[in-house]
Amino acid sequence: MGKKVIVALLLMISFVSVKAQTAIKDQKPIDKIEDPDNLASEYFSQIMGVALSATSNLKLYQFVYDWIGTPYRLGGETKKGIDCSGFAFELYNKVFSTLIGNNSRNIFSMVNPISKDELKEGDLVFFKIGSRSITHMGVYIGNNKFAHASSSKGVMISDLDEDYWRRYYYKGGRLLASLRD
């Protein structure tokens, strides 16, 4: 990478971090991080392979970015190790100020099932891997991509069109309106 690109990325990360810290200090809930120069949007678009728009929730992408590479640990709920439902729980708690269940099956009971072509940023995706019941989940981030805690690689971004995920995909889900308020 060229020096200019590295400097621009570091400035963008600092900008997003300062905005997030300022929001925490001011105790104001923020739904979106302001990004007047689109630096954060461009950065996350490149890193995550998702085309972000002016309405994209940068707080969601910042959260995912901060957790990428966190190792997998069944029942884990910290950056020392986390599982798929723990990751979704933390994301919904921190990004949307919403508490959801603590395992993929009971979280599925909290959503309206939706088709794959209806998925939007922040929706949940569920998988049945080698089982008749839901065994894995992630959070949809756009462009057929979802963030999740993989048992082999930890927190990562995958594509729903990859053969593996296409084979085991069960349903998408949007949190019931009564739980979002």
Image (tube, helix red, strand yellow):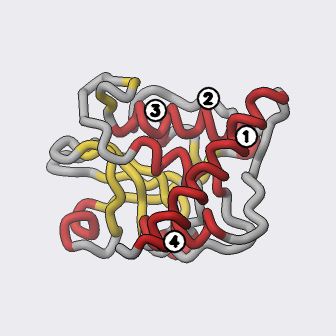
Question: Which image quadrant: the C terminus?
Answer: top right
Which residue is located at x 43 percent, y 72 percent?
A: 49
Q: Residue at x 53, y 45 (%)?
A: 63
- The amino acid sitting under disc 2 is Leu
Residue position for label 1: 180
Do labels 1 and 3 touch, CB within 8 Å? no
- Disc 3 designates what residue? 106
- What is the x, y in percent for residue 135? 28, 42
**Disc marking residue 45:** 4
* Amino acid type, mark 1: Arg
Disc 3, SS: helix
**In the rendered image, which quarter contains the N terminus?**
bottom left
In terms of secondary structure, where does tag 4 sit?
A: helix
Nearest-to-viewer mark from 2 and 3? 2
Which three-letter amino acid code belongs to the residue tagged 3? Asn
Q: Residues within 10 Å of mark 2 (few under 14, many from 20)?
A: some
Q: Which mark is residue 96?
A: none
Real-space CA distance between mark 2 and mark 3, rounded to the nearest whole angstrom: 12 Å
In the figure, is residue 162 to the left or right of 89? left
Front-most of 176 and 20?
20
Secondary structure, mark 1, is: helix
User: In x, y percent, where is residue 5?
Assistant: 47, 72
**CB atoms at circles 2 and 4 under 8 Å apart?**
no
Determine if residue 134 is in view: no
**Disc marking residue 99:** 2
Q: Earlier in the sequence, mark 1 or mark 2?
A: 2
Rendering coords of residue 64 (x, y %): 48, 49
**For residue 110, what is the image quadrant?**
top right
- Mark yes or no: residue 92 visible: yes
For marks 4 and 1 on the same chain, the one whose residue lies earlier in the sequence: 4
Q: Residues within 10 Å of mark 4 (few under 14, many from 20)?
A: some
Give the label, 4 or 1, closer to the camera.
4
